[in-house]
Image (tube, grey):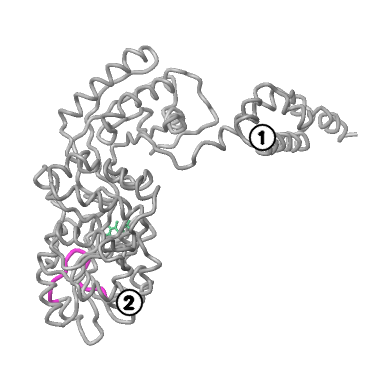
Amino acid sequence: MPGDYRQRYLRLLPSVERVLQESILQDSLVEMPRSVVVEAVRDVIARKRVQIQNAAVDEALGLEFSPVRLAGEVLLALEEQTISSLRPVLNATGVILHTNLGRSPMAASAVQAVREIGGSFSNLELSLKTGKRFTRYEHVEALICRLTGAEAALVVNNNAGAVFLALNTLAAGREVIVSRGELVEVGGAFRIPEVMSGSGAKLVEVGATNKCYLKDYRRAAGEDTALLLKVHTSNYKILGFTAVVPARALVKLAAEQKIPCMEDLGSGVLVDLARYGLPREPMVQESIGAGVDVVTFSGDKLLGGPQAGIIAGKKKYLEQMRENQLLRALRVDKLSLAALEATLRLYLDENKALREIPVLRMLTLSPEELLRRAESLAGLLTEKLAGRCQVTITREKARVGGGSLPLASLPSMQICLEAPQENAGLLAAKLRRADPPVIVRVHKNRLFLDLRTVREEEDQLLVQTLLQILGSGEGNPEEAGTEQ
Ligand SMILES: *Cc1c(COP(=O)(O)O)cnc(C)c1O
């Protein structure tokens, strides 16, 4: 009978009670509800049962069902359940605004604000002065106005939401004129043409991909035009023979047409990056200064704060957006708002912003500082990994990422690890599953760790984790490496 051996093995499976008696499970039985442990034991036994039922004779012989072995599997499963899915990681990719890695890490004061507001009641929608209702937006409006020169401001969930709300409010059912060269796609899901149609506005493209003149906008403007839209091509550049219409000229044309002019800045930086040797990125203050009626930008790109979409501009238009029912659906939550307020406060003193906002600090780190740290870490690694792994320092450029400054490459330093006997992809996968996870770049069977995106206070932790993983030598051949 072919089914016989299966029956025999099924009978070998220990009972739930028997596995629960194993000594390695006793701590778990004290620390967590019995039902959770029992459930995990049942799961493991059920998994074994399926294995037996699917096994051919020879394989079945290889299966091991001792209570202690099963208890070990239970323990692993219980440990996995207690680790958070969303965890802090060490970003050694050198990409500062890495959307997959949560974009910008926040300043200490922003983190503190999240802790305080999150763990307590707050005056989110209550004026402490008058005891009356207050809108959540008022906590940051004055600050945004002060920093950008705008008359009014509003904050929503993210910049995609900001653009959507502005278009829906100002142009639903009517036309919006945009240059062909500015039909941006950001991270797949956000595309100007799609956002436009979703918002109910009609896109009117003008100009050619590389050149667009004021006369193109003028020719397209008519009865049905509701808005002139300028989009900062934040994640690409058109080079060579190009022409774009400056904001000031668009503002003038919009005024003639008695319609507003809007600019989606994407990153929305508040400090002049050119002063720190970086490529110029249009500043929010400049757009407002040029008279743009509505400016939108992200909270977690170059601003270095929480995910948020900031809308700054003329009172008249901001009032209309406040009245839009969609605002409720796009509403910013109190934690982001708390972090945003704290982040914006740092900008009141530019030096403080540069020192305390991690994104700005990383952007402006000097090569000398990076070299000093790289040499110190490489020294430690060389000493401990001698014979297993070759450690060198490379000087490749780092990217800003997050759809910002696409052409900017920052002179940077990497620690390069080469273990000729091992597959770098497998090592990267092991580092990703370490505690804390370390995210590195793999190229030509070598690991590159860029220190620009690692905070100096994380250096020791990085070395320890590397030594733990690279020093241990047991490989896991099932894990195929992915080049990042
Ligand atoms: C990034 C970006 C957006 C989307 O901003 P999120 O904050 O990611 O929603 C919109 N427009 C431009 C030009 C961008 O660069």
On screen, 322 above or below 174?
A: above
Q: Amino acid at mark 2?
A: Ala
Specify the segment rendered in magenta: 204-215
Q: Is residue 116 above or below residue 448?
A: below
Q: Which residue is depicted at the point 39% across and 60% down?
A: 189
Instruction: Give the numbered dot on residue 365.
Output: none
Q: Quick check: 325 above or below 344?
A: below
Q: Position of residue 108 (x, y in %)?
A: 27, 40
Quarter of the image where the C terminus is located: top left
Q: Quadrant of ligand 1?
A: bottom left
Q: Residue at x 36, y 30 (%)?
A: 444
Q: In the image, is residue 211 part of the stretch drawn in magenta?
A: yes
308 drawn magenta? no
Secondary element type, mark 2: loop
**Residue nearest the observer in this picture, 56 or 96:** 96
User: In this rendering, would 352 be left or right of 13?
Assistant: left
Residue 53 in the image, given as x and y percentages of width and height: 78, 37
Q: Amino acid at mark 1?
A: Val
Residue tagged by mark 2? 201
The reply, left or right, for residue 46 in relation to residue 160 is: right
Residue 37, label in figure: 1
Closer to the eye: label 2 or 1: 1
